[in-house]
Amino acid sequence: MDLIYHNGNSDITLNQIYTFIVVAEYGNFTKASAELHISQPSISKIISKLEEATGLSLFIRNPRGAILTNSGRILYQEWKKALNVTQAGFEKACSVLSQNKYIKLGFPGSFSASPQIFPVIQEFAQTYPDIEINMEEAVSLELRRGIAGEKYDVVFAPSYEYEYYNSNGYLSRLFCASPIELCIGRSHAAAGNEFFSKDLMRNETLILLSEEIAPDYNHFVQELCRKHQIPYRSVAIAENLQSAYISLIRGQGFFLTSASWFPGINTDGFCRYQLSAEKGGILMVWDKNSANPAVSEIKKCIHY
């Protein structure tokens, strides 16, 4: 709706004002019709409604065209100024937007509170105050689609997704590392042990996450178990992270994770045992066409 003024029961619209200005400048309804690509009767109707809304006679009509009345001349001068200001403002806004510098970052909600990520973003914002930082929390699948579809310039992802990004031509590096740990609930029968031996796991359930929540996680964990010869009796697929936590708290199996991926395991409700020197963590992934952004060089992914 282009309503710009309400006078009692009558409305004046931007369309009416623009049509009035064109008719005034051409001094002819036929020429105005050709300019606006609307019929002459339609223009006559628009002007009539404008005269009705203002309560003023705007044109003196004659066979040769339309001449502005004194009232029409005053309105033309003022509305022309207003229209020029509006146009200038629009062009200025477009100019500012075209010069705007920005960067689009995506990260999974599972580690949105990670203490490693936000200090870097904060430092970046302070160093480059003229850069607009757009940050969005999304599930892993959306991050993948987003960076492929140019929605994101940089995404932060769990390190177990390295193979996916690597095989699809993206550049990535380990943004921060943390040990892979075996996690059980405090109610688990073995929770009091100083060490959690492989033999204790033979009759245990390995808790995995659904592919929708954590793509590639299952493959990564099962390869990890094979590599370290970690036995398990069965596999349980948790619908989401919360249900995995609940199963662990009830002592119903074990979970392999990194504190960087899922900060919730840092609470007192869990016991954690480090898997030798195995490392997990967070990847920083960027588009294959961008320059290599070290932590201090994320600016190379900025849109200018």
Image: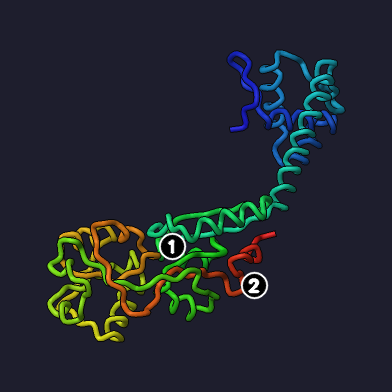
Name the residue: 48% across, 70% down.
Answer: 283
Q: CA distance from mark 2 to mark 1?
A: 23 Å
Left or right: residue 117 versus residue 296 is: left
4, 73: nearer the viewer? 4
Secondary structure beneath dot 2 equals loop
Residue 51 rendering spot, x and y as whole percentages: 71, 18
Residue 60 rendering spot, x and y as whole percentages: 82, 19
User: What amino acid is labelled 2 in the image?
Assistant: Ala
Relative to residue 85, is residue 292 depicted above or below? below
- The label on residue 197 is none
Left or right: residue 94 versus residue 247 is: right
246, 236: nearer the viewer? 246
Left or right: residue 17 versus residue 218 is: right
Relative to residue 97, is residue 76 depicted above or below? above
Name the residue: 72% across, 25% down.
Answer: 47
Q: How many marks?
A: 2
Q: In the rendered image, which residue does mark 1 sit on?
A: 142
Secondary structure beneath dot 1 equals helix
Relative to residue 59, is residue 294 depicted above or below? below
- Check contact, mark 2 vs mark 1: CB within 8 A: no
User: What amino acid is labelled 1 in the image?
Assistant: Glu
Relative to residue 83, is residue 187 depicted above or below? below
Crowding at label 1, few (<14), some or many (≥20) Cα neighbours within 10 Å? some
Discs 2/1, front: 2
Q: In the rendered image, which residue does mark 2 sit on?
A: 291
